[in-house]
Amino acid sequence: HYEINGPVLQYHPFFRCYNKTNPAAVRQVCHQAMSFLTLARSDTVFCEGEVPSCPKMFFVLSGRLLYIREGADASSLIQGQWAAEPVLWTKWVHQGVLKAVTDCSLLCLDREQFCHVAHTFRTQDFYPAEYAIEYADCLNTLDKGSLMDIHDRSVDIDDILRKVFGEDTLVTDRRASGMMTKLMRRKSRKSARESTVSACDMHDERGFQVGHIKSEASDMTAV
């Protein structure tokens, strides 16, 4: 599972840094918390106002999806991108609609299983909890009209990673990211060649609250 899911999970910079600092946890996440989802053209992943009953973060393996949010330009998601990260860190209501434009394949990260693994494999520096706190703090600086289910510049992931992991880890991650980008481009070109052949509102006066990772962070403090 790790050999297949690990590189995809590490599309996201947090998981690249987490893999460097706690590889055992990331391996277990790949074994326990990830699943595949196949979509046909026009299938919907989630809708605006939906409170997910089984919250998941999505990583695009192949195909193209369209994210539509009222008041914002539509955005395409392709291989190497992700959606619905906030569900990992806080209680979340989807802010827009994510639909498949073509046949798609996604890798899904289950929040409950991820939190369970993160808690089980926690270290003295409980990085998922620290990241969750910083991420929720960042969301609380945004107005409701700026909230998105996909990554955009309003949430500065590099800044969050710098606070959580430190500058040294972030510099190393950028080097790894460059190598991964080159690898993904090669895979994308290969995939393109093969394809030619086979052809709710949680933002109230209290702000966003960190999800049940926060209680685990409290447990860590008490230890």
Image (tube, grey):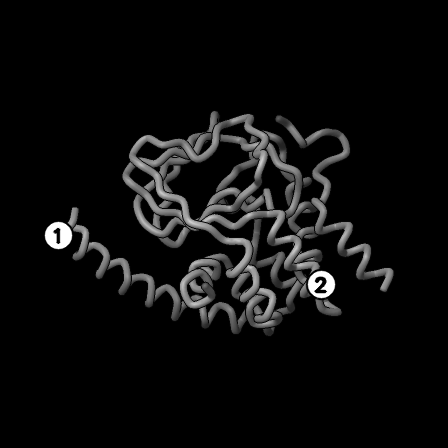
Which mark, by number, is residue 1? none
Q: Residue at image x 59%, y 42%?
A: 87
In which quadrant of the rendered view does residue 23 lie? bottom right
Q: Residues within 10 Å of mark 2 (few under 14, many from 20)?
A: some
Q: Residue at image x 77%, y 34%?
A: 206
Is label 2 in a helix, a strand or a loop? loop
The answer to whether residue 208 is left or right of residue 189 is right
Place of residue 32 in the rendered image (x, y in percent of width and height, measured from the top left): 55, 57
Query: Which residue lies under the disc numbered 1?
Result: 197
The answer to whether residue 63 is left or right of residue 115 is left
Q: Nearer the viewer, mark 1 or mark 2?
A: 1
- Disc 2 residue type? Phe
The C terminus lies in quadrant: bottom right
If you read the primary sequence from the N terminus, does the residue marked by circle 1 or circle 2 appear first? 2
Place of residue 197 in the rendered image (x, y in percent of width and height, measured from the top left): 12, 52
Place of residue 80 in the rendered image (x, y in percent of width and height, measured from the top left): 39, 54
Q: Are marks 1 and 2 in contact (CB under 8 Å)?
A: no
Q: Residues within 10 Å of mark 1 (few under 14, many from 20)?
A: few
The N terminus lies in quadrant: bottom left
Place of residue 99 in the rendered image (x, y in percent of width and height, measured from the top left): 38, 33
Q: Residue at image x 64%, y 27%?
A: 201
- Disc 1 residue type? Val
Q: Is 218 located above or below residue 180 in the figure?
A: above
Is label 1 in a helix, a strand or a loop? helix
Q: Residue at image x 53%, y 31%?
A: 95
Query: Which residue lies under the disc numbered 2?
Result: 126
Instruction: Residue lying at the far left in this picture: please name it.
Output: 197
